[in-house]
Amino acid sequence: MTTTLTLVQGDITRQSADAIVNAANSSLLGGGGVDGAIHRRGGPEILAACRALRASHYGKGLATGQAVATTAGALDARWVIHTVGPVWSATEDRSALLASCYRESLRIADELGARTVAFPAISTGVYGWPMDDGARIALDTVRTARTAVREVRFVLFDDAAHRVFEAAMG
Ligand code: ADP
């Protein structure tokens, strides 16, 4: 089965997809950047589901590189898949953890039966990952993933990020 990769520029909270991936933090209780935008537009149902997950399974938080799904609330999607990206380090290679975010999100998407998945550029905001390296890892990981997802859409917030992903796409 082939997975189509597409790149679009825009706000991921405006996308229609089976699953929208959130670059969350380990608390699962919301934050800035794309996380804040998803909770704002998705409404309180998502936060309530995150709180319930914390209470039942993730008292110590969701580990870096892992992913978990909730309702998508008012977003035009069935699920939000929350994944925790690594903070960029100049001294330690954390790229396996960033790849894990994409792979685990697709694994959860497969479990749910999602066929279209929208990703932001995980870790490339507050977590400081260089966009070109983040794009390379994102595209390599999705290209080599074994998944039943038919469309993986990268939603890049600004024109610069979109151009970097386009260049990395080759
Ligand atoms: P992280 O903490 O994983 O770095 P951020 O949310 O700070 O997460 O940033 C991740 C990427 O998401 C950045 O490239 C940022 O520009 C982008 N971003 C921020 N808001 C949105 C949005 N509404 N839609 C899509 N991408 C977004």
Image (tube, rainbow, N blue to C red):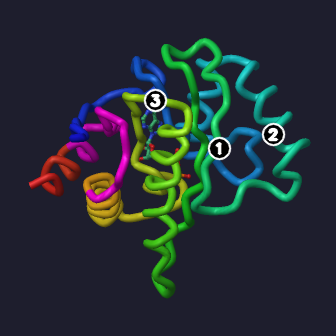
Q: Secondary structure at mark 3?
A: loop
Q: Is residue 140 left or right of residue 14?
A: left
User: In x, y percent, where is residue 80?
Assistant: 58, 31
Q: Which residues are magenta?
A: 144-162
- Does the image show residue 5? no
* Type of amino acid at the residue the image marks with label 3: Ala
| Front label number (3 vs 1) | 3
Residue lying at 21% horizontally and 37% vertically, measured from the top left? 4
Q: Secondary structure at mark 1?
A: strand
- Does the image show residue 111? yes
Label 2 CB-ligand 1 distance < 8 A: no
Identify the mark nearer the N-term, 2 or 3. 2
Badge 2 local density, few (<14 within 10 Å), some, or many (20+)? some
Q: Secondary structure at mark 2?
A: helix
In the picture of the structure, the residue carrying the numbered disc 3 is: 114
Badge 3 local density, few (<14 within 10 Å), some, or many (20+)? many
- Distance, label 1 to label 2, CA atoms, is 9 Å
In the picture of the structure, the residue carrying the numbered disc 1 is: 68
Between 170 and 70, the residue placed more toward the observer is 70
Q: Is residue 142 left or right of residue 65?
A: left
Residue lying at 27% horizontally and 32% vertically, measured from the top left? 9
User: In x, y percent, where is residue 90?
Assistant: 46, 81
* Type of amino acid at the residue the image marks with label 2: Leu
User: In x, y percent, where is residue 104?
Assistant: 52, 53
In the picture of the structure, the residue carrying the numbered disc 2 is: 53
| Front label number (2 vs 3) | 3
